[in-house]
Image (cartoon, rainbow, N blue to C red):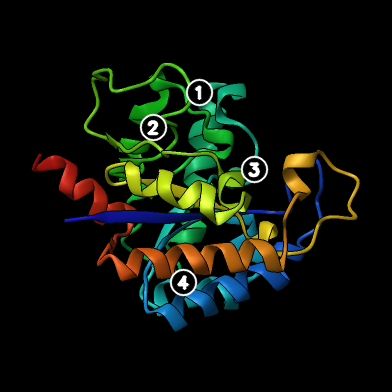
Amino acid sequence: MKNITITVDVEEDCPPMLTSTRGMEEGLPELLDLFKKEGIRATFFVTGMMAEQYPDLIDRIPGEGHELGCHGYTHARFDRMEKEEARLALKQAGKVLRQFERKLVSFRAPNLQFPKSYLGLLEEENFLYDSSIASYKPPFLRSKVKSKIIRIPATITSSFIRLPPGLFIPLIKHWESPVIFVHPWEFVDMSNTPIRLDCRFNTGEKALNNLKILIRALKAQHYIFLTLQERAKLEKYQ
Ligand SMILES: [Zn+2]
């Protein structure tokens, strides 16, 4: 069964470089509309702060059949926090996000940085799945971690789908069960914003169109679109 998991990290624009939230106001509604139109589901990892600021938008996520996951409270990096600080951040995020989704089981840390020694904190907060690692970054899993948490790596970095579709679609098809991720701010034109190139090239309409082309190409080949939770359950039975 060919499958793909699309994940969206919901946060302020290109953190920590910007604090604007154009992605929330313009990009996230566009993404939700696209997924609805295409009839597919995704996993949205949301920061507690964005959920507090945009409750109506966040309500749409579980309301439209998507999985709501946790992306920390602020976008601060967990690998730069003391353990107690990390515990509090998870607790605070969980408290906010569970008002939208009682069954909050998936987590992804900002910048895909989450110390292995903190996995127990995820268990304390009743998370089951963690996607804070990347197949393209060391230590190239899958090392055995003593934790009940199932770790599902992201297959490829987010700006990848802003390359020409003729280039990235064959690669995505080549991977087995890929987990891709995007951000709402990538679907807003950031080309005139003074930030690093990977945060602004081909953002806005181009990015949205690329994502649409990808979804349609995969649908044409009968791919199934899984949430992270569903994808992790498959892992268990392999
Ligand atoms: Zn993030």
- Point out the tag, 1 or 2, that comes first from the N-terminus: 1
State the residue position of label 1.
Answer: 83
- Point out the tag, 4 or 2, that comes first from the N-terminus: 4
State how far apart marks 3 and 1 are (Cα): 16 Å
Extreme residue in the front direction: 166
State how far apart marks 1 and 2 are (Cα): 9 Å
Residue 59 located left or right of residue 164: left
Q: Which mark is residue 97?
A: none
- Point out the tag, 3 or 4, that comes first from the N-terminus: 4
Residue at disc 1, secondary structure = helix
Q: Residue at x 56, y 71 (%)?
A: 31
Residue at disc 3, secondary structure = loop
Q: Nearer the viewer, residue 114 or 88?
A: 114
> Is label 1 in contact with label 2 (beta carbons under 8 Å)?
yes
State how far apart marks 2 and 3 are (Cα): 17 Å
State the residue position of label 4.
Answer: 61
Q: Position of residue 1 (x, y in %)?
A: 16, 56
Disc 4 crowd rating (10 Å Cα; few below 14, some 14-19, many 20+) is many
Q: Is residue 29 visible?
A: yes
Q: Is mark 3 within 8 Å of ligand 1?
A: yes
Rendering quadrant holding ligand 1: top right
Type of the residue with mark 2 = Leu
Q: Is residue 9 visible?
A: no
State the residue position of label 3.
Answer: 75
State how far apart marks 4 and 2 are (Cα): 25 Å
Disc 1 crowd rating (10 Å Cα; few below 14, some 14-19, many 20+) is some
Quarter assignment of residue 111: top right
Q: Position of residue 89 (x, y in %)?
A: 55, 40
- Point out the tag, 3 or 1, that comes first from the N-terminus: 3
Q: Mark 2 or 3, which is nearer the eye?
A: 3
Type of the residue with mark 3 = His
